[in-house]
């Protein structure tokens, strides 16, 4: 392995799943890319030579099986792995990271520390038990230049070169500037936000609502019902986000409303697809056996436990928890939702 001082510097992408390979191709339009591929991914169902839809990786993308090489050859890294393995990946990467490294993650999930002895009933989580990926990065490494990217970024559409946009969020201008410089092209706009937590939570919480939207699609409901869910969903996202320490602004922009609309209306969304299949009669066990990681499942479970700590109500999250983990029928959940007591105020958080 060559040393950092003598090697040609690349931008690193950690994770060769659908979104990881898509981001690698986006970056490759502006710079050379070193893509970390986990050996298990390469030998199972992920081909490290292809982006979603079978689109080839750009010729200036090099793959590696060594995290140390990524840290040694790259100053800017884009970690894009499922939240359930993000901490493990960071523990393996951390010994090779220095204070000059910059990490901009693209993972829309949470790291949750569950109580060792849950006992009966649903456990209560506190904010200390629930970490975003940026919080996890700073907890596990010396890196302080941290950001995230989030928005309506369906991998297949990006791979096809369709016009789209994302948000790069960080409290540090240098991180935002690097993200915009590396990702922007004629078909891909890159907006900015200083509210890192808010943008991260937009990407996390919209997964809950997308499962619900998929359920509605599976039952054949139309635009009125889906619009009701989406509009009440953004309100629920704002309430939860504010309780966790985020501002309102990100939820009204591309990472919030924009991503929510995309994942609630597209069959390309894993969370929407999960909800659709649940409504059509599949069990959660069956779905978890046959498809890639669906972040919304763990998000529903975590947020349902966290709202107990905040002593707040989140009807969509609560009902989806019962659908996913307690066997409540989707049609019955919709009936409960329509009877849920309201304060008769449409928007009261501005």
Image (cartoon, rainbow, N blue to C red):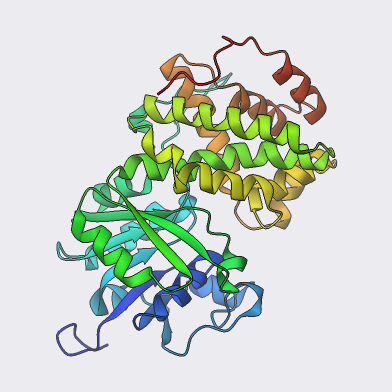
Percent coordinates x, y for residue 139 in the rendering: 25, 47
Query: Along the line of sight, which residue is nearer the eye, 55 or 302?
Result: 55
Quarter of the image with the N terminus is: bottom left
Query: Against 311, is 179 above or below?
Result: below
Please name the residue shown 23% across and 47% down the image.
171
**Where residue 150 sits: x, y (%)?**
44, 53
Q: Please tell me whether residue 246 is drawn above or below residue 176 in the rendered image.
A: above
The relative height of residue 108 versus residue 344 in the rendered view (above or below) is below
Q: Is residue 60 left or right of residue 4?
A: right
Image side of residue 138 versus residue 308, left or right: left
Choose between 180 and 155: the one closer to the eye: 180
Q: Residue at x 68, y 36 (%)?
A: 212
Residue at 20% across, 55% down: 173
**Does any portion of residue 143 appear in the rendered image?**
no
**In terms of image quadrants, where is residue 161?**
bottom right
Q: Is residue 338 left or right of residue 169?
A: right
Displayed quadrant of residue 162: bottom right
Residue 280: percent from the left, percent from the top?
Answer: 85, 42
Image quadrant holding the C terminus, namely: top left
Q: Residue at coordinates 32% horizontally, 57% vertically from top-left?
A: 91
Q: Is residue 298 visible?
A: yes
| Rendering coords of residue 321 (x, y %) | 64, 29
Specify whether 349 is left or right of 333.
Answer: left
**Which picture quadrant has residue 248?**
top left
């Amino acid at each position: 392995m060559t040393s950092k001082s003598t090697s040609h510097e690349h931008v690193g992408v950690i994770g060769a799943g659908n979104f990881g390979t898509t981001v690698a191709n986006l970056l490759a339009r502006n710079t050379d890319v070193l893509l970390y591929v986990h050996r298990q991914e390469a030998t199972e169902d992920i081909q490290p030579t292809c982006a979603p839809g079978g689109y080839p990786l750009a010729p200036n993308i090099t793959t590696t099986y060594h995290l140390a090489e990524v840290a040694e050859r790259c100053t800017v890294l884009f970690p894009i792995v499922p939240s359930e393995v993000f901490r493990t990946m960071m523990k393996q990467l951390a010994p090779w990271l220095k204070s000059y490294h910059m990490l901009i993650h693209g993972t829309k999930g949470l790291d949750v520390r569950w109580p060792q002895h849950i006992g009966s009933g649903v456990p209560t989580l506190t904010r200390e038990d629930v970490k975003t990926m940026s919080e996890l990065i700073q907890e596990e490494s010396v890196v302080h230049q941290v950001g995230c990217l989030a928005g309506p970024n369906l991998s297949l559409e990006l791979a096809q070169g369709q016009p789209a946009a994302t948000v790069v969020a960080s409290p540090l201008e240098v991180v935002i500037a690097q993200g915009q410089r590396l990702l922007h092209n004629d078909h891909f706009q890159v907006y900015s936000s200083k509210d890192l937590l808010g943008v991260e939570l937009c990407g996390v919480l919209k997964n809950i609502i997308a499962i619900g939207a998929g359920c509605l699609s599976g039952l054949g409901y139309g635009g009125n019902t889906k619009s009701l869910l989406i509009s009440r969903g953004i309100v629920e996202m704002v309430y939860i986000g504010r309780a966790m320490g985020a501002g309102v602004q990100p939820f009204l922009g591309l990472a919030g409303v924009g991503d929510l609309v995309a994942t609630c209306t597209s069959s390309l969304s894993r969370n929407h697809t999960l909800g659709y299949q649940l409504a059509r009669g599949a069990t959660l066990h069956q779905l978890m056996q046959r498809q890639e990681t669906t972040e919304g499942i763990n998000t529903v479970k975590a947020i349902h436990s966290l709202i107990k700590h905040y002593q707040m109500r989140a009807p969509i999250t609560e009902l989806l928890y019962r659908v996913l983990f307690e066997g409540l029928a989707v049609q019955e959940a919709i009936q409960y939702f329509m009877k849920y007591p309201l304060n008769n105020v449409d928007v009261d958080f501005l």
